[in-house]
Image: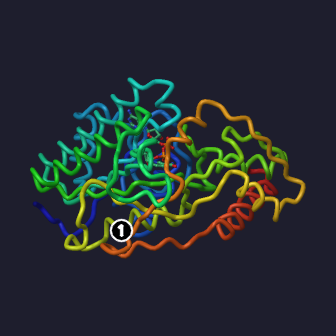
Amino acid sequence: MQNRGMKKILVTGATGQIGSELTMALRKKYGRDNVVAVGHKRKPSDELLSSGPFEFVDVGEKESLEKAVKKYSVDTVYHLAAVLSATGEQNPQAAWNVNMGSLYNVLEIAREQGLNRVFWPSSIAVFGPSAPRTSTPQETVMLPGTMYGVTKVAGELLCNYYSVKYGVDVRGVRYPGIISSETPPGGGTTDYAVEIFYEAIKKKRYTCFVREDTVLPMMYMPDCLKSTIDLMEADASRVKRHDSYNVAGMSFSAGQLAAEIRKHIPDFRCDYKPDFRQKIADSWPMSIDDSPARNDWGWKPSYNLATMTMDMVQKLSKRFAEGRL
Ligand code: NAD
């Protein structure tokens, strides 16, 4: 396996909720010219465009992706492009094609070009109704009820296969719902936990698409970035699994989140009108056991419900006051 010493990174899904912030964090850490952002249809932000190289690539087209990898002498890929859970249930065929086709392309390019390392995120969506719903263990029944979950289980198996068969150093975590203040989420079941902040600040009203008592595992973006970069930086001897690690941040119900926001915005009112996403939420874990990630490579989250809510409200209120929300 080649090792140029110097990291040349490519991030797919770079205009997405996680990719947009991960790209900036990686540029800060490794140098702006060493991190290539790959977008697709969504318009990239001015910040993303002006802070380093950017390419438009359909990750379903292997040749186009390969061209970008060769053009920038890439040795590390963070593959974040995907169709998410709620959008995936509206078009399961597209979810399968994009999620599986693109991961296969990335792993094949890693094998053929001898890339140093690949990051690919899985999700708590790998678990279905037959898995324990509290403290869901790293290894348990994985029978998801969504096509998105099916692609994440199959993706984990594929990553593990490429690691064992070809020695590709592929690493991943099962993200819970990610909460962030920069880029809006792109069609997942936990999107309400972000939308609620925008609507609370703009209108003091929100209609939530899951029931008040719906509990799901969540994580604040700084912890999401930390889990990703910590795992990718970990010495190979500490990374014992190449499917994906459970990682936990916090767990709360939609009602608890609304109550926490009310501590900062007392006249905020939240109503609940569950739609098709309730069924997906009901099939997912409420909390996650992430002890293997903690023991193997030292994972530890920094934010809880109170500190995350305070930071979100402060950041979004400032943008609202400046007319930028
Ligand atoms: P997002 O929907 O915000 O962004 C995904 C990006 O993928 C989009 O910008 C889109 O342009 C790109 N994309 C889709 N099809 C493409 C194609 N054919 N070619 C190139 N690009 C394409 O998603 P996100 O929330 O940033 O998620 C990133 C990764 O993290 C995904 O793998 C997702 O499954 C995983 N994940 C996210 C969450 C979450 O709460 N956000 C939770 C669990 C797992």
Quarter where residue 98 is shown: top left
Quadrant of ligand 1 in image: top left
Q: Is residue 213 left or right of residue 157?
A: right
Type of the residue with mark 1 = Ala
Is 203 drawn above or below residue 222 in the view shown?
Answer: above
Instruction: Give the image location of residue 5, x and y in percent.
Output: 20, 70
Q: How is colour applied across the structure in the image?
A: rainbow
Residue 239 falls in image quadrant = bottom left
Relative image position of residue 304 (x, y in whole percent): 61, 69
Please name whichever residue, 20 or 189, is drawn nearer the observer in this view of the structure. Answer: 189
- Vertical side of 32 occupied by 183: above or below: above
* Residue appearing at x 60%, y 37% in the figure: 278
Which quadrant of the figure contains the N terminus?
A: bottom left
Q: Nearer the viewer, residue 256 or 233?
A: 256
Percent of width and height locating residue 187:
55, 37
In the displayed structure image, the side of residue 112 where residue 267 appears, left or right: right
Instruction: Note whether 139 is above or below 308 in the view shown.
Output: above
Residue drawn at 47 percent across, 61 percent down: 135
| In-image side of 284 versus 147 (left or right) | right
Location of residue 155 in the rendering, given as x and y in whole percent from the top left corner = 29, 43
Q: Is residue 54 visible from the viewing direction of this image?
A: no
Q: Is residue 197 above or below residue 249?
A: above
Q: Is residue 70 left or right of residue 304?
A: left
Q: Residue at x 53, y 34 (%)?
A: 86
Pick whichever, 22 or 250, lies toward us.
250
Which residue, given by chain and number where applicable, does mark 1 sit on? Answer: 293
Residue name at image x 66 percent, y 70 percent: 307
Residue 247 seen in this snapshot: yes
Q: Secondary structure at mark 1?
A: helix
In this view, which residue lies farthest toward the right?
267
